[in-house]
Image: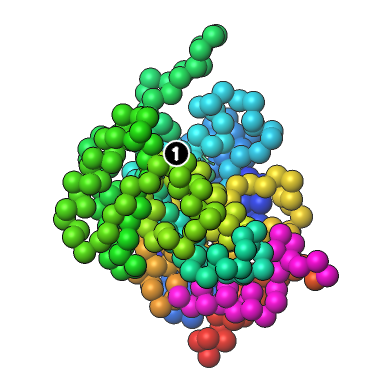
Amino acid sequence: MKRILVLPGDGIGPEVANEAIKVLECISEITKEKFEFEYELIGGISIDQRGVPITDEVIEKAKKSDAVFLGAVGGPNWDNLPMDKKPESGLLKLRKSLNLWANIRPIKILMKKISPLRPALLKKIDFVVIRELTSDIYFGTPRAIEENRAYNTASYTREEVERIARLAFELARKRKKKVTSIDKANVLEVSAFWRKIVSEISKDYPDISLEHVYVDAASFYLIVNPARFDVLLCPNLFGDILSDEGGAIIGSLGLCPSASLGDSNFGLYEPVHGSAPDIAGKGIANPIASILSAAMLLRYSFNMEKEAKAVEKAVEKTIKDGLRTQDIAERNQRPVSTREFGDYVVKKIKEMYL
Ligand code: IPM
Ligand code: MN
């Protein structure tokens, strides 16, 4: 039996998480592998009901589960709270408390038509952002807002850079054998250090080619030549930014899943997109990122590669059969609801196992 803690969160979080859970239930039914779901609060809804964006009890429950599935956090209601009381800080606390130092965000073309890039550029877009997740300017101290000054601290230890670099090289080995390390080493000490450690680690991986690219140049190349990337190794902040750009070039953030991992198989799975308060509660959000995050859960936490692939295939088939939520629909097409899309994916999975 596997235990999954579900944190639907805010905005469209609950709607898209629902579809992912439906897919996991379907896989459970097919494989007879029992999944047990427990639901808890994170983000704005936790602030409203419990006064804090995540309680210690929820973090304890997460630690006791085999995987955590998260919808989204945040919204305009909570934007003006102090930094450590905001919904987002609940998610950051969860990642940090669970020591989930690696965030994996695959970027792949699913639908050519919705990309803002010229068709000629789209052919080989297939890369993975490996984002360091528990350090950098996100967590560095000192940090404060004072009356006439504010500051944060970007910092990395050798160990933090080493482990994420190794993960990137290992992953590249299973792919096109190319790592692009992102930094701003022409300006920042923390980046010069990052670059030095990544170069050192690369000596253990002579079969992998390594390039260092400044983050400004990388954001340029992502648009003019995205096919050059295979594994993008990023510090926390740059990875956050470049992964959104990845979503942009494939046409929608609604297509981008993510897995956050640490030293074991345990992981936190969430779509890259946010809570999209403007469309929340309408049942029209795109559940693809969420469903693909469930596939990553099967792959990384449950070692169910075959089932993970089946889920990904089912999403592709659903797209191929023309189902589109409003964000990816063509002009004269009737968009389907979040639920209709999810139901169809489930149907496709079942067909594959007949
Ligand atoms: C992401 C999000 C989060 C981050 C926010 C919600 C804290 O933007 O997962 O990319 O900055 O890491
Ligand atoms: Mn982000």
Q: Residue 328 magenta-drawn? A: yes
Amino acid type assigned to the residue bearing label 1 in the image: Leu
- 64 displayed left or right of 150: left
**Residue 276: percent from the left, percent from the top?**
67, 47
Image: 278 above or below 80: below
Instruction: Work out which residue is located at the far top of the displayed protein and give it.
Output: 147
Residue sticking out furthest to the right: 332
Report the residue at 49% width, 58% height from top.
225
Q: Is residue 233 magenta?
A: no
Nearer to us in this view, 113 or 121: 121
Hey, which quadrant is residue 1 in on the image?
Answer: bottom left
Residue at x-position 39% and y-position 61%: 230
- Residue 162, image x, y percentages: 23, 45
The chosen color scheme is rainbow
Residue denoted by label 1: 237
Highlighted magenta segment, given as a residue range: 309-332
- Counting other residues with Cα less than 10 Å from the Cα at mark 1, is it few (<14), some (14-19), or many (20 or more)? some
Answer whether residue 102 is visible to the viewer in this image.
no
The residue drawn where x is 47% and y is 41% is 216
Front residue of 166/48: it is: 166
The answer to which quarter of the image holds residue 114 is: bottom right
What is the tally of numbered marks visible in this picture? 1
Q: In which quarter of the image is residue 155?
A: top left
- Horizontally, is 99 left or right of 273 in the view? left
- 311 vs 133: above or below: below
Q: 327 or 113: which is nearer to us? A: 113
Q: Where is residue 159 in the image (x, y as percent from the top left)?
A: 22, 40
Specify the principal SS of the magenta part.
helix
> Given the current orientation, which residue lies at the most extreme left position?
204
